[in-house]
Image: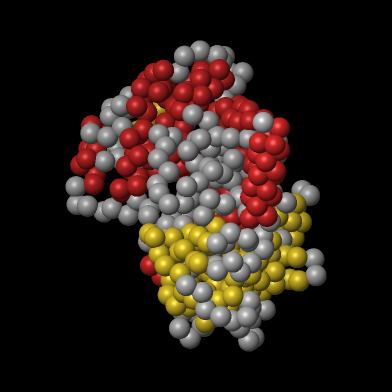
Amino acid sequence: MKKLKTFIAVSMSLICGLQASAKDYSMRYTVEPDTAGHYLNVSLACSGRQDGQLRLKMPVWAPGYYEILDFPKHLCDFNVADSEGNKLKWHKESKNLWVIDTEGKVDVAVTYRIFANERNVASSRVDSKSAFIAPNGVFMYVDGDVQHPVSVTYSLPSGWRNISTGLKAEKDDPYTFTAPDFDVLYDSPVLIGNHYVKKFEHEGRDYEFAIETPEGIEESGFEDCFRAIVSECNKMMGDVPYDKYALIHLGKGGGGLEHINSQACYTEGTYKFDSRDEWLNFLAFVAHEYFHLYNVKTIRPIELGPFDYDKEAYSPLIWFSEGITCYYECLILLRAGLATEEEIYKLLSGYMANDEPYEGKHHQSLRMTSYDIWLNFMNHDANSKDVRINYYFRGPVVGLIMDIEIKRLSGGQRSLDDLMRLLYNRFHKEKGRGFTEEEFWAAVDEVAGGSMSHVRYLVDNPVEIDYEKYLTPAGLTLDREKWLIRPASAK
């Protein structure tokens, strides 16, 4: 028995040692844009693994972009060799899983190419002037080990000068960036080229503007506006969850995507706007993406991280992550002094006016949009307004109602701001996780100091909203002909 125990102990020690050594490996990428063919040439040096197989996976979607994009469809010319250049055998087990027979070799070199010619914020693009790198569709991780450190070195085409990302470069190598895990790497898009760059410090943090089409940016006063947006958000939350933040604007196009250390947005291609309304809509867009680093990246439903990059992340609370952020983009501009109260009421009224024509409010609840977004993210069926609603429109309206009702039930002592701070501190800072749906609604009641079940009813059911019921006690009136909110005291 003593010999058996000794044998088991030695065996377990060896097994643990092998497991530890399997973890003790490095992942080093090199990326070189091919401007003529719209490709990214990718090389991976994986060193130190001592198991017989190397199983590499690529995500099929990007958090914040609620659509399966099947990034591996852009990959070609996959090859593997050992340190001496001898080719190694490999095969695929699924659309996004490559299995390599390492033949006992501890150093493996993988190469492949990514076709990069799409103009959306979740996909990569390479042209003669610049390269935008959306990491989810470029880098592979070892199956089951997303939390492993990784480094990336970018090789710039001749004549290109700038690399911009939310990650900080290595101290002695401005072309190499290290991430503590692949979640952080995937959350850090990159812009390479000769784009406009401006770096500055604000309230103890580093910032970088990376702008493809900077026409009018200096004259517009945009930097001061952005500083004001940042200051207002940070003041409200009382904490800043990054050391460096990169604002990446990609020229004319549509859409934006939030990240913990950056935002990547297509713009109008200029900072010269024809009207005050267009300028405010642009600032609201920037504020929206910035506030997402709180509401969705850190204040998050529990389903939104850690991520399974193989399949959809279903949550009943995406309406809150997106719709309430639309509400806060208005509050931020007002509090930062970038818009008047009248202008903010106009922005909020726009959401209400957009929501009203949707007959889908009789068929789909706001809660259900959180699940069905995976079906409807880019779905423009002719009957959309007849059977569906849009959480970007109804969400901020419910946000306004939540704010009003929290203030009413708490006797004016608390507001929606207090809910955001509670969720941030209790779940992100203290528990290091997101919140469940029931935890969310319990927190809503806690902040309000009473039951908010009547507001939950508006979320969970396909209903008409009785706007006057909530607006009138708050001293607001609604002109239903113009669909415009204003203070009841206003003439």
Left/right of residue 117 with respect to residue 87 in the rendered view: left
Q: Residue at x 52, y 82 (%)?
A: 34
Q: How many marks?
A: 0
Residue 349 in sight from this viewpoint: no
Quarter of the image where one finds residue 350: top left
Q: Position of residue 316 (x, y in %)?
A: 40, 34
Q: Residue at x 47, y 47 (%)?
A: 308
Q: Position of residue 395 (x, y in %)?
A: 41, 37
Q: Position of residue 341 (x, y in %)?
A: 53, 38
Q: Nearer the viewer, residue 453 or 373?
A: 373
Q: Nearer the viewer, residue 87 or 153?
A: 87
Q: Position of residue 408 (x, y in %)?
A: 51, 17
Q: Residue at x 39, y 60 (%)?
A: 93
Residue 320 in sight from this viewpoint: yes
Left/right of residue 483 with respect to residue 383 in the rendered view: right
Quarter of the image where one finds residue 180: bottom right
* Colour convention of the picture: secondary structure
Above or below — where is 50 with respect to 339? below
Above or below — where is 439 with respect to 289? above
Q: Nearer the viewer, residue 377 or 42?
A: 42
Above or below — where is 394 with respect to 26? above
The C terminus sits in image quarter: top left
Left/right of residue 463 with respect to residue 266 in the rendered view: left
